[in-house]
Amino acid sequence: MTMPDRPSQRVAVCTGTFDPVHLGHLDIIQRGSMLFDELVVGVGPNPDKAPFFTAAERVELLKEVVRPLPNVRVEAFEGLAVQFVRSAGARIMLRGLRTLSDMEYEFSMSLMNLNLDPGLETIFLMAREEYSHVSSTLLRQIAQFGGDLSKFLPHSVRLALEQRTRELNK
Ligand code: ADP
């Protein structure tokens, strides 16, 4: 059996909408940064709904919270995630898994991505228990009703979400 060349640097890409980034995302990013030489966080479009924060705002919020992690960089992308992974010089996609329902979706997604690009591998990290119920959608809803977000969001992101919610409610 001939083995493909092993890259000297292991680069992984973690894509998502990050609308906005929360502590569940940050946990996966932090743990990923320990596993790979470089981790690229790709901020992509959400084909299903208009985002709460613009791509530029989501990138800014992420850049601020990953600043302590020197091997993590953040970039926005348009189009297919597999193409972004390749353009970032990687062949590994890193994803977080929260629930069984995530598993079903992520399973089809990773098989589709493998079809689109057979050289690409998806690696999953299980969400930490305390964040396994956290999603950006839920946090936006909690913000709408003035709930306490401090357990789930970095300080700067909490302020930005509260501010944007106030603006939209005016
Ligand atoms: P997408 O819209 O592609 O699901 P998200 O912004 O929701 O993007 O999530 C980006 C990545 O972070 C995905 O791999 C997702 O599974 C993971 N993720 C989302 N929420 C959590 C969480 N609470 N704990 C761990 N991983 C999470």
Image (cartoon, rainbow, N blue to C red):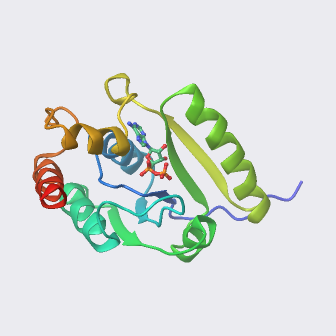
| Looking at the image, residue 55 lies above or below residue 11 | below
Give whichever of 139, 75 is nearer the camera. 139
Please name the residue shown 13% across and 37% down the image: 146
The reply to whether residue 68 is in sight is no
Please name the residue shown 16% across and 55% down the image: 169
Q: Quadrant of ligand 1?
A: top left
Quadrant containing the C terminus in the rendered view = bottom left
Residue 28, position as x, y percentages in the image? 39, 42
The reply to whether residue 130 is in sight is yes
Give whichever of 13, 45 is nearer the camera. 45
Image quarter of residue 85: bottom right
Taking the image as shown, residue 141 lies to the left or right of residue 151, namely: right
Please name the residue shown 44% across and 64% down the image: 42
| Looking at the image, residue 141 lies above or below residue 83 | above
Please name the residue shown 30% across and 45% down the image: 26
Which residue is farthest front? 170
Taking the image as shown, residue 8 lies to the left or right of residue 167, namely: right
Taking the image as shown, residue 140 lies to the left or right of residue 83, namely: left
Residue 69, position as x, y percentages in the image? 25, 55
